[in-house]
Structures are given as structure tokens and as C-alpha cells.
Amino acid sequence: MQSERSLIPTPMPVRRHARSGNRGLVLTALCLAVLLVVMDNTIVNVAIPTMSDALNASSTDLQWVVDAYTLSFAALLLPAGKLSDRWGRRRMLLVGLAGFAVVSAATAFSWALWQLVTLRVVLGVCAALIYPATLSSIIVIFEGSRYRSLAVGLWAATSGVGIALGPIIGGVLLEHYAWNSIFWVCSVIGVVALACIAVAVPEVRAYRSERFDFPGTVLSVAGVGLLVWGIIERPTYGWLSWQVIGGICAALIILAVFAAVEGHTHAPLIDVGLFRRATFTSSTCAICVAFFCLFGFIFITTQWFQALRGYTALQTAVATLPFAVVMAAVAPFATQLAKRFGYRSVVSTGLLFLSASMFVVTRVDAHCSYWFVVVPTMALMAAG
């Protein structure tokens, strides 16, 4: 079994441009930035019924308020990670968080659907600048530290908790304030995270500045964007529609060209040779499946509570609380369990839990027991 160090590619040496600082404070600042990015993707879910009345828009139209963020975030994640290597992770975090705080505040003043969707696209761009820089900073700053595994585990736990925390915070806010309060909260968190990064996190970047891979960037944005768009539009057009099939097929062709181009580029956006390593590929697929299930589960659950069971936003927030509690309790121990029992065993068990919980979800109806069906399902999903 390969060590944890071998699973994390380090294609070039890095350097620190500032004090190393207190690592606990550094980790707190980086986790706060991650929490903001992930939470913003789910906090809107619980507000869709309220926004529908306020903006006189259908729930289907408002779906793009959620999806616009996801689409731009996913499409730009790879190029943003490469840019953080060139320009510096701290600098990229500061730019991303400043943009996030400002755009979130602007979003709170939206009065039309088109305006809201446009600003959510920009928020997704800011999120893409932030997210990859957090993990790469942790990897470098905790290099050689015996707390490195714990730091990565807490980063992963923060990502998971953020998914569940969004609907909870959104539900509490909507019980007392208007729908735009969710964007004001994200703006405030962005400002706090920006201050923490500025004070605590040192600059880390690559030793040499290579030419930026513009062809790879264009291909990756087009390929990933089309693929995500095809998945998003499946409920509208259906899996067998020419829009969805055409979009996904075009995306796969573009991504195949991207892989071919990257294999012959001196400074590729991503080293596609990494995917020849079974450990790297299987780990990437496991993360993809886990987050696919998590985001889908939270989105469906918040709508299910409100639309089918008639819960208020606050009741929905309380009802999803067990998910966040279990996630926060279990995730930090994942790396320790992996060291004791092996990564393969722990990841396989997690995927088994995810599969079992998703199977139960397919059998749930509006009248099932909350305590005997819904809560155990959420706990199993969160633990997985």
C-alpha cells in the first residue's frame, strides 16, 4: 500500500515567502475559507421556496441560482489551481475571498432572476480561486509535520460539514429575515476569512514560473462545463434527449482531446500520467462519488422536507442537524482509521455506507418515520 505522501503529487518544489506562523491558526483560516465555499453551494437550497415568492419565479427557474454557481466553479477549478501555483496560494486566496465578499453583498441587492443568476456565476468563479489553494497550502505548510494527516482530515471534514451546515444556517436566517440574508451572512464570513488569511497564512508558490497552459485551460473549461451542464439539465430534458446526450458526448470528446494535448505539453494544466496510477485514479473516483452523493442528498432532502412534509425553513434546518453532527464527529478520524486498517478498507467501507444510504433514499416516501428512517439514513450517509 502506498503511503499518504505518495498519493499527493508534488510536481515542483515550493517556497514560502512569509513567516510560517502558528499552524493551528493557519489551519483554522484555511478551513474557514473552505467552509464558506462549500456552504454557499447548499445554503441557497433551503431558500428556493422563499425566493420563488419574492422574485415571482418558478422553482425550475430558480434552480439555476444553485446550478450557475456549481457550473462556473466546476469548470474553472483546474485552471484556478494552476494559477495559484504561479501567482501564490495566499495571493489567490485573498483575491478570491475579497471577490466573494463583495459579490455576495451585491447578490443580496438582486431584484430580478437574471441578475441573481449572473452574480452566482461570478461567485462560482471566486470559489474556484479559493478552493484548490486551501488544500495545496495545507500540504506545503504542514510538510514534515506529524499533524499533516490530521490537518488534511480536518480540511475534508470541513468540506463535508459545510455541505450540511448550509441548509441549517439558511433555515435559521429565513425564519427571522428575508431571503437575501443568506448572502449577507456569506459576505460577512468572507470578510472574516479574508482577515484570517491575511494575518495567518504565509505565501507559498512554485519555484519557477512556467508558461500558462492556455490550450489546456480552454479545453478543460469547455469539457468540464459541458459535462456538468449535461448532468444539470437531465431533469429538464431527460437522459435520452439530444440536448443531454449531445452535451455529454461533446464533453467526453473535448476531454479526450484535452488529455491528448496535456500529454504532449511541457507545462500541462494537470499531469494526466497520474491517472495511470490505480491508487490515484481510484481515490479521485471515490471523492467524486462521495461529493456527488452528498450534494445530491442535501439538495433533495431540503426540498423533501419543505415540499412534501410541509416543514418551515427553520424546521428543515433542525431536521437536517443530525447529518452535520455525524459528519463533524466521524470525518476527523478517517485518516487515523486509514492508518490502522488501510486506506482501501476505510474508503471501501465509506462507499458501502453511501450506497446503502442512497438505496434507502429511493424507498422513502412522504409519510415515513423521521426518527426510524430519515435520521438513520442521514447518519449512514454522513458517516460514509
Image (cartoon, rainbow, N blue to C red):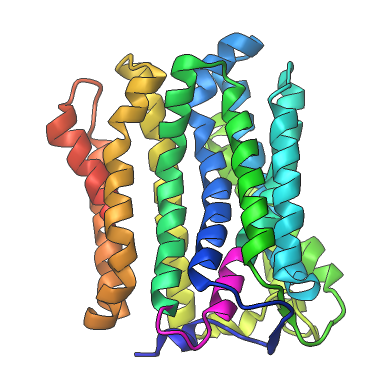
Q: Is residue 71 above or below residue 257?
A: above
User: Residue at 56% across / 40% down in the picture?
Assistant: 40
The one of 179 and 151 positioned closer to us in this rendering = 151
Q: Is residue 366 visible?
A: yes
Residue 250 among those drawn in magenta: no
The one of 74 and 106 positioned closer to us in this rendering = 106
**Quadrant housing the N terminus:** bottom left
Q: Is residue 212 left or right of residue 172?
A: right
User: Residue at 64% across / 9% down in the picture?
Assistant: 56
The picture places residue 260, in percent across and down from the top left corner, at: 72, 78
The picture places residue 352, in percent across and down from the top left corner, at: 25, 60
The picture places residue 46, in percent across and down from the top left corner, at: 47, 26
Q: Is residue 167 above or below residue 212?
A: above
Q: Is residue 265 left or right of residue 238?
A: right
Residue 254 position by quadrant: bottom right
Q: Is residue 315 left or right of residue 165?
A: left
Q: Which portion, as a residue range, is magenta?
A: 134-147
